[in-house]
Amino acid sequence: MNQMIQFFKQIYAGVQGQNTPQHISYIRHLQREMQKNLYLDTPLQELKAVVFDIETTGFYPEQGDQVLSIGAVKMSGSSILSSDTFYSLIRTDQLLSPEISSLTNIREEHLQSAPEGKDVLIQFFKFVGNQILIAHHSKHEQAFMKKLTKELIKTRFEHRIIDTSFLIRLSNPSLFSLELEEVCRNCMIDIKDRHHALGDAIMTAKVWSYYLKEAEMKGFVNLRAVYEHLSKIG
């Protein structure tokens, strides 16, 4: 932990706006720590995780769409640590379409004073540490995080992301492809601050909590048992 803190201090002691060896060293350190995380065999009620969400200008990072904000909340088992959250806008010069601005309630003037993407990424990785990530429809988050990490920090994004559908499939296979608000309605979860990165992260955390409890009631003791069961049923 002291080594991680030292890395973080070095990052902010460097020249602002430039990549430094400390940036890359810090991320690689986290990646090594991730390899030590035996999350598959951790009892479900002891599983440490970070549920996150991003808001973007579109769906296609390789076609120039960008991340506007990142929100996240930590969990311990099915308990949501509501006081342990992360949220930040990300500075971008890309013009927002009226549709995206209306959907997310983010304005271009908000983004002009937001932190640089590289700094937000480092803060986010510090918040996550070596814990697993959880997201709803996680391919979207994964694609953008891979592109951001490669472009801004010049290294690979290797944090593990588990999709909520992983647990949803145990109880309601027909729901795993639905939008977040539809899944929330099925679980009697209040829909609040939709299309705000932290709001969506908190609702996703509630979905994960709901289905984690369901998995336990079905007798699953850890994620490995879930993986093995799902691999058998296809």
Image (tube, rainbow, N blue to C red):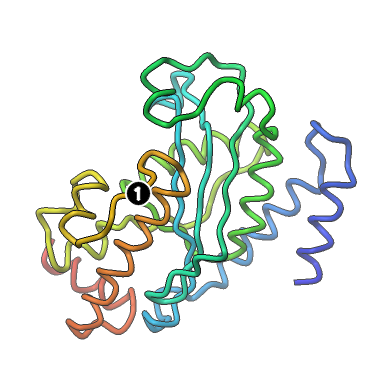
The spot of residue 113 in percent (x, y) is 69, 27
Residue 108 vertical position relative to residue 72 in the rendered view, above or below: above
Look at 38% across and 61% down and name the residue there. Answer: 205
Q: Which residue in the structure is indicated by mark 1? A: 192
Residue 57 vertical position relative to residue 115 in the rendered view, above or below: above
Look at 84% across and 47% down and name the residue there. Answer: 12
Look at 78% across and 36% down and name the residue there. Answer: 19
The spot of residue 67 in percent (x, y) is 51, 32
The quadrant of the image that shows the N terminus is bottom right
Left/right placement of residue 115 relative to residue 104 reads right
Q: Amino acid at mark 1?
A: Lys
Left/right placement of residue 231 relative to residue 157 reads left
Residue 142 vertical position relative to residue 40 in the rendered view, above or below: above
Left/right placement of residue 102 relative to residue 180 reads right
Q: Quadrant of residue 227?
A: bottom left
Look at 68% across and 50% down and name the residue there. Answer: 123
As helix, strand or loop, the secondary structure at mark 1 comes to loop
Q: Quadrant of residue 34?
A: bottom right
The spot of residue 118 in percent (x, y) is 68, 37
Q: How many marks?
A: 1
